[in-house]
Image: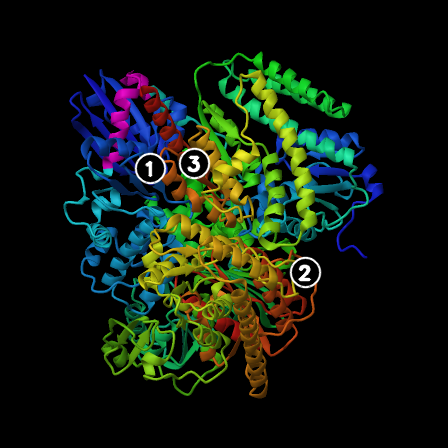
Amino acid sequence: MEYVIGLDIGSTTIKCVVLDENNQIVYKSYERHKARVREMAYEKILSLASTLKNSKIKLALSGSAAIGVANVANLTFVQEVFASAYTIRKHLPDSDLAIELGGEDAKIIFLKGALEERMNSSCAGGTGAFIDQMAALLDIDTEEFDKLSLQADQLYPVASRCGVFAKTDIQPLINQGARRENIAASVYQAVVDQTIAGLAQGRSLEGKVVFLGGPLTFLKGLRIRFKETLKLDDEHALFPENGEYYIALGAAYYAEDNAEALDYDELCQRLYQASIYKENLQTIDPLFVDEEEYQEFLRLHRINDVSYASLKGYDKEAYLGIDAGSTTTKLVVIDPQCNILYQNYVSSKGNPVNVIQKELIHIYEEAPNIQFKGSCVSGYGEELIKAGFHVDEGIVETQAHYQAAKFFNPDVDFILDIGGQDMKCFKIKDGAIDDIILNEACSSGCGSFLESFANSMSEDIATFAKKGLFAKHPVELGSRCSVFMNSSVKQAQKNGATLEDISAGLAMSIVKNALYKVIRIKNKDEIGQNIVVQGGTFLNDAILRCFERELNRSVIRPSIAELMGAFGAALHALKHKKEKSTLLSEEEVKNLLHTSTAFQCKGCTNHCNLTLNDFGNGTRQIGGNRCEKPISGKKQKEDLPNAYTYKNEALSAYFHREGKKGVIGIPRVLNMFEYLPFWATFFEKLGYGIEVSDESTKALYDKGARSIPSDTACYPAKLVHGHIESLQEKKVDMIFYPCMTYSIDEGISDNHFSCPVVAYYPELIQANMTLHVPMLSPYISLNDSKQFQKRIHEEFKKAGLNISKKEIKEASDAAYEEYHAYKKRLVDFGTKAIDFAKQNQKKIIVLVGRPYHIDSLIHHGISDLLQYLGLVVVSEDCLPYLPYESRKVLNQWTFHARMYNAARIAAQDKDMELIQLVSFGCGIDAITTDEIKSIMKEHDRLYTQIKIDETSNLGAVKIRIRSLLAALEDE
Amino acid sequence: MEKHFVEFTKEMKDTHTIFLPSMLPIHLTLVEKVLNKEGFHCVLLTNEGPSAIEEGVSSVHNDTCYPALLVIGQFLDALKNGGYDPHKCALLITQTGGGCRASNYIHLLRKALKQNNMEYVPVISVNFSGLESHSGFQLSLSTLIKVLYAIIYGDFLMIINNQVRAREVHKGSTKKVFDECISLLCNALEDGSYRKTKKYYREILEKFDTVEQKTEETIKVGIVGEIYMKYAPFGNQHLEDVLIEQGVEPVVSGVLDFGQYCLENAKIDQRLYGKQWLAKTVASIAQAYVTHQQENMAKAIEKHGRYRKPSSFKEVKKYGQDMISDGVKMGEGWLLTSEMCELIESGVNNIVCTQPFGCLPNHIVAKGMMRKIKEKYPLSNITAIDYDASASAVNQMNRIQLMLINARNQASLQKES
């Protein structure tokens, strides 16, 4: 007898297929390998002894974690995409393409013509593991998650990028009480969008599509979303039997032709060698040498324990603090002496209202005569909980954490809080928060990562963490964000690291990630002398140990590290004590009946997806809103100057022009936000009509998403594709979108470049989109009017447009005049806005970004939010220019030079605060952010940065801005 | 005028060791020789361990491109752990300038030095626009010509060495010859006579002939990309070696083409943006000289007959013309697209495009052009590899494996037909 075996070892699972001489499957298995890659491969073959003994065996390995095994065991390896293509061609020869989702990989294989494959880049993790994480967020298993998704009635927009991003979209939905059915289906839609936007890269997904891999085999809801989105009928969407085994099967078929036939014992021997083989891994010292050292460490930290009093039958005054955090809800009840009467830390299970209701009922039952004289809520769910339970106060979470830290050390000057999803770090100077650093959407290597990693190893987090304490050789995994960490763990596993070593290594990585990537400390002294660390993640002793070791000093970790937000809220309630708290009584809490309904706001063009929460007692609350409109029915914004609104209005004057010569379409993107007044006037004078593309919306973005070749480019650039489609639909005669290496020299920089993406995006459009309308993209600079006239004349001639030099000269003169008049209007507006603010004692926010940041889909309504909070908003281009000053970095981009200029002005004006908008993926802002921060710091001023992407999670932004405002009040 | 940077003074020429980053190991070995002959004390860095990366991660903004992080990390690591007195060290960095953020490297390096309390270390920038001058680092025309020769020889050696290494019958046998050639060229550069150049080319080609080589056709894989990632083994994790181990021949174009590209851009700038006549004239003269040298090298290879000669810069440029405008001049700009087309036109369908994660120009000129290239050349087999401190080698290797399988399939299909 002769058998062939295909062994597919992926990031999380090991799949095995055994075929007999007739190519029939005699055995197949699908198991999680929990990082025991080599051992499992060996054990698998051992377990098949009864079948395989005394046979000749041909075996090939495939999958991302299999290369190491194959090399050491000297067995045949076949790349996994190739393997599945092999199987598809055998079983489904007329398929056009295959979509395969695995634990961490997503692939599209184009089968027609030359075999072409696309794999997800290292940044985009939205796959099987991502769905697992999202299910965990709702506290259900994937099976139930899938069932829920089938009953969805609405889809919410969820970022179709890496898991970390999607989480920031989903969390607010959970906190707002959106239906879990809809969340589940939205998550699936995000995976679908991710696959299409990330992998299609310009190629259309048509014909017969084969769907492969575990998630697409097991998850019905996901299949439905794919079929609907790709508009496939049953004949064109193929879900083959054994879809999860296609790689293993391909490996087996490959083995048949290419692998050497081995005796069973020889095969076992080789795999055994691989299972005991150790490669040299970068390791660090063990965290603790022995139990004794660990006990001493614990003893030292015990001094930061809090004191407790009994809740049972308590009938005196008490204060309630709630922290409705991202994944968990924390409650603390204290007496006037700050003894803790009650504390709890519970998973929100996708519905914080139910959790708090249960908790409050429990408290009332334990102490029916408890007298609440104050209550306070903090965290993501603040608004919902405050409305639902009539909580007295709301406090921004950064303040809550500071209050709590101060309790443990009044001189605290540095607080680091690592929670499930967020990392917050504040520096305290003279009793006020001086600097706030929050993790950006990208580097959320926080607790939930560790937890989902532990879960994927089928360990609970506590056990997993414990394992690391006494690891002999913790592996060095580097300091990187969670999505990447998965792949380096994979690599360590491949090289034979044990679970213990990985656990300790991950603890070190989380610490390094926080210190070097999020806080970005340059040297250890800048971090302060009195350090308090908190957040659930620090309850993990391994992480605390790594942190102390990396900084080489001891820190305070309160025993209630995970409850500090709630504790701080309780302290705040105590500080603002009332005669009687407005908190719902026992009976009212019991009668609370919470229901939530999703609906779309029609108040303005944003069409926000809102959630109406009804608490059954007459209290209703709306979540997801950016403005007060849906709540009050009218605009309640104070009529304050807002440069972002003003600029949008001023630009809208150029959106449409009539002309006899035909219509020129101009995309409303990138540098067109700057130069539209010029081009519109120029073409109008030449006798052309002008049509500008529609306003940016998610739907417009989706229209062009398939032709985006590089998914790591910034969102403003990726939006261009949708705008070009919009122009094509408008049936314009020609699209004008020039390549502009240079902007105009404004005398405040060393050169006047555009950024590479802005400058050359038209090239990318020409190369990746199917254009039915001619697009003119000349290389043009507006810096010198004479040169411009000469060049545009040449270009028109090349394009067959017959326009005389004289006409060009006249049009150009008018265009420059209009452009400068427009620029002057902006500065005039800015000057007036600042005067207004100063006369009316309003704070001014200098919201700096690029011209295209006024697109409300790009900035997510942040300027409106600021206006709501009673702030006057000005932008970088409505401030006057200071005389040239050299910078510590090369100041060579026109738009960026304006931000330095604005920072210099804001730094010296006490009425101004600066917030910088940074688009994710903007390489140049890696330079500007540091420089702007240092300009502000030179004058001892706060610097706030908001990173924006396609996610429209205003919640995190709100916290940041409210923290800024709270910090200002403190001063 | 007061200088806002630490100058490399005349005195320092005697007292200071100048670090060169390990970007182009072959070329810079030769350049190091030339400069040391002029009285400098240059050292080509070889520290490529994790501590160099760690230094980079902690001193450079993590969204900055990976090459900056590696170069700066390597310098800092050498200053701290290299056994030198940092007070007696200087750093040499090459700069391309232009609209790409890479032109900020020197500023980032100085910032990083300051954060590490080593702002006294002079940083010498070598660039085409000559922004800063250091009294202790003035190169005469004859030295500059020597450096140019070092680079030409470097290109030559790299091109031939890759071809022979991929075919060597006895593993490692090329290395011995290669080392001999390096010392031969070092002597040649010290000698300073350029009339013998043709003789050196011939000698070296003959030396490589002594390596026993396979006769069957090897699969060729072109390497293109961001300049640091393309050439620096520290950056691309020894991609050339990896490919050779897999039995394929890496095809890497000479770095002088990049120099040509910079000169060419001066001419294009004049066409598009006017003025700058002087720059254009200087560029034209320099280009004529470089072109002449490249032609000599190509001729020598052609005459010898056994090895593949590189395409001329003119041809390289021509192949990209209908793909992308030559107005794209930031980073590697149109050159990168042109190089991919040139490789395919000359029969190298398989290409690894190396780039730092999130490289801005490469969104346009690399990933942005792949669809168009595939349309024109259906058989092209290009894989883009992103490099950064977090990308795992497993994923990178996986992609390279996939490209290689496609390459092998194509090769066997071709054989059949």
Letter of the chain that mark 3 sits on in the rendering: B
Residue A201 visible from this viewpoint? yes
In the image, residue B150 lies in the stretch drawn in magenta: no
Report if the CB atoms under discs 3 and 2 are less than 8 Å apart: no
**Marks 3 and 2, how far apart at CA:** 41 Å
Please provide the residue range marked out in magenta: A245-268
Q: Secondary structure at mark 3?
A: helix
Which of the pair A951/A579 is nearer the observer?
Answer: A951
**Marks 1 and 2, how far apart at CA:** 47 Å
Residue A969 visible from this viewpoint? no
Residue designated by label 1: A116
Q: Amino acid at mark 1?
A: Glu
Find residue A887 and name its label.
Answer: 2
Letter of the chain that mark 2 sits on in the rendering: A
Q: Earlier in the sequence, mark 1 or mark 2?
A: 1
**What crowding class fits label 1: few (fewer than 14 Cα within 10 Å), some (14-19), or many (20 or more)?**
many
Give the left or right position of residue A692, taking residue A519 as reference.
Answer: left
Q: Position of residue B191 (x, y in %)?
A: 77, 23
Q: Position of residue A847 (x, y in %)?
A: 53, 71
Q: Are marks 3 and 1 on the same chain?
A: no
**What crowding class fits label 2: few (fewer than 14 Cα within 10 Å), some (14-19), or many (20 or more)?**
some
